[in-house]
Amino acid sequence: MTQDLTVVERVAGRCGELVLLRRDGQFEIVANGVFLMDTRGGASERLQVSVTADRMPPPGRMLIGGLGVGFALAAALDRPDVGQVHVVEREPAVLRWNRGVLAGSNGGGLLDPRVHSYEDDVAGWLAGAPGGSLDAICLDVDNGPEWLVSPDNAWLYGADGLGAAARALSPGGVLTIWSAAQAPAFVARMTEHFADVEVLEVPAAHGVPDVIILGRVPRIRDEDQPGSRPRRSIL
């Protein structure tokens, strides 16, 4: 079967080459030749936001790290209990595509008055977040804690990154991580920083299920001091 494939744009991004493709009427984002996401599905991205919102306390201040094609943002804005959304995306092209050709796929969420968007690295942004300033953090910046788009993102999944997330959350706050595969070592690390840790599987159309790793009720430990990331006031 012949496919209708068009390169919409090819750019040099912060993580390397980024390509936006249109294939059979749907959009795909590819980084350095590796498929990242498309507009065909989004079930696990939406579920990540849904299970996070179900568990977060009011007033529902949510961070979405990694914009992708906007499915997570659209799901957040569908929830009346989400009062504010901070979207952190380091790739300017991804932000521009979501305001342009991808807006029809995600409802134009970046234009919603509840949304504050930042062109920034989510690790540095999170390291600078004031304590207790967020009720939920949804991270989808890699294919999982053990399958990184950028080596620099390893900080997010280590003790310093989890400590920064715990500090940024309110007492009943929730952190969720999207992963394309199970990550038992990371789950064990999560239990050091959160009192309640869950692993949810989302069946995929092909291959192994997607995974959502959820931590609730952060443990603020004396040894959780800022790591090597610079801290700055951002909210």
Image (cartoon, helix red, strand yellow):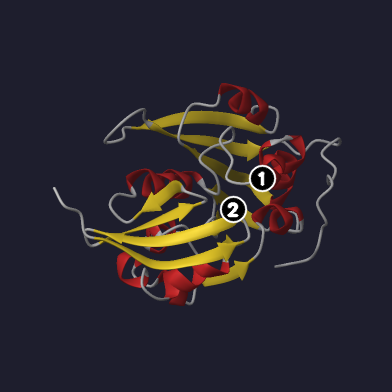
Q: Say which element carries label 1.
A: helix
- Above or below, 203 relative to 35: above
Please report the residue visible at 34 percent of the width from the left and 50 percent of the height from the top.
42
Query: Crowding at label 1, few (<14), some or many (≥20) Cα neighbours within 10 Å?
Result: some
Q: What residue do we see at 36% from left, 61% from top?
A: 21
Label 2, secondary structure: give it.
strand
Dot 2 or dot 1: first in sequence order is: 2
Left or right: where does residue 33 sit relative to residue 185?
left
Which amino acid, mark 2? Asp
Coordinates of residue 184 in the picture (x, y in percent): 56, 22
Crowdedness of circle 2 by 10 Å Cα count: few (<14), some, many (20+)? many
| Inter-mark Cα distance, 2 to 1 | 22 Å
Q: Which residue is found at the position 37% from the left and 43% from the top?
A: 44
Inspect this view and state whether residue 217 appears. yes
Q: Is residue 60 shown to the viewer in this render?
A: no
Q: Amino acid at mark 1?
A: Asn
* Residue sitting farthest toward the left: 1
Quarter of image, res 9 = bottom left
Please, which residue is most extreme toward the front here? 2
Question: Which residue is rendered at x = 80% and y = 63% of the image?
Answer: 232
Q: Position of residue 129 (x, y in %)?
A: 73, 58
Are the residues at dot 2 and dot 1 in contact (C-beta closer than 8 Å)?
Answer: no
Q: Which residue is mark 2?
A: 135
Q: Residue 81 in the image: x percent, y percent? A: 44, 59
Comparing 40 with 226, the one in front is 40
- Number of numbered discs on residues: 2
Residue assigned mark 1 = 153
Taking depth in this image into account, of 54 and 50 the one nearest to the observer is 50
Q: Nearer the viewer, mark 2 or mark 1?
A: 1
Give residue 54's mark: none
